[in-house]
Amino acid sequence: MNQIIKIPYEQSRREFFLSLRDSYRRKLRWWKQQYPHQQYAPSEIHDKCAEYGAAVSYLQDVLRLLEAESARIGISQPPTGRTEEA
């Protein structure tokens, strides 16, 4: 039988944005490793890197705002295995 684990909303929201940011970081890293004129055009590689780079930057800002909001209302964030700025 499955056991249901109760997770606070703030923690689940933070974990969601962390996993989304990590996913976009992996995609950005993959696009940065592509060689122009082999499978993708240089303009496509540049556009994808810019798109994923902007998404990662946005998610970093969202995570900072969530932490500031949590600190303001007195909720401590549990430590995760992920680093914020890595």
Image: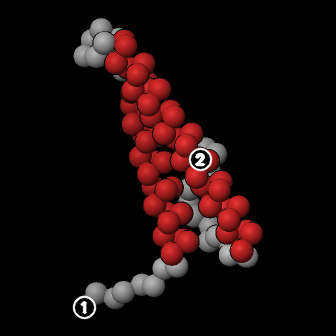
Residue at image point 73% right, 68% down? 71
Q: Residues within 10 Å of mark 2 (few under 14, many from 20)?
A: some
Q: Which residue is mark 1?
A: 1
Q: Is residue 10 left or right of residue 70?
A: left
Q: Position of residue 22 (x, y in %)?
A: 47, 48
> Circle 1 — which element?
loop
Which image quadrant is residue 86 in? top right
Residue 47, x across and y down, in percent? 40, 22
Q: Does the rendering let one see residue 83? A: no
Q: Say which element carries label 2.
A: helix
Q: Nearer the viewer, residue 85 or 10?
A: 10
* Residue 34 in sight from this viewpoint: yes
Amino acid type indicated by mark 1: Met
**Which residue in the rendered view is the most extreme toward the bottom?**
1
* In this view, 77 is above or below 52: below
The front one of 79 and 6 is 6
- What is the count of numbered marks? 2
Q: Quadrant of the N terminus?
A: bottom left
Which badge, 1 or 2, comes first in the chain's sequence? 1
> Mark 1 and mark 2: span between their CA atoms?
38 Å
> What crowding class fits label 1: few (fewer than 14 Cα within 10 Å), some (14-19), or many (20 or more)?
few
Point out the frontmost of discs 1 and 2.
2
Which residue appears at 57% of the width and 64% of the height?
80
Q: Label 2 is placed on what type of residue?
A: Gln
Q: Is residue 60 left or right of residue 39?
A: right
Residue at image coords 65%, 56%? 65
Q: Residue at x 60, y 55 (%)?
A: 63
Question: What's the image's color scheme?
Answer: secondary structure
| In this rendering, position of residue 73 left or right of residue 52 | right
Residue 32 in the image, given as x and y percentages of width and height: 44, 24
Name the disc covering residue 60, or none. Answer: 2
**What numbered label is drawn on residue 74?**
none
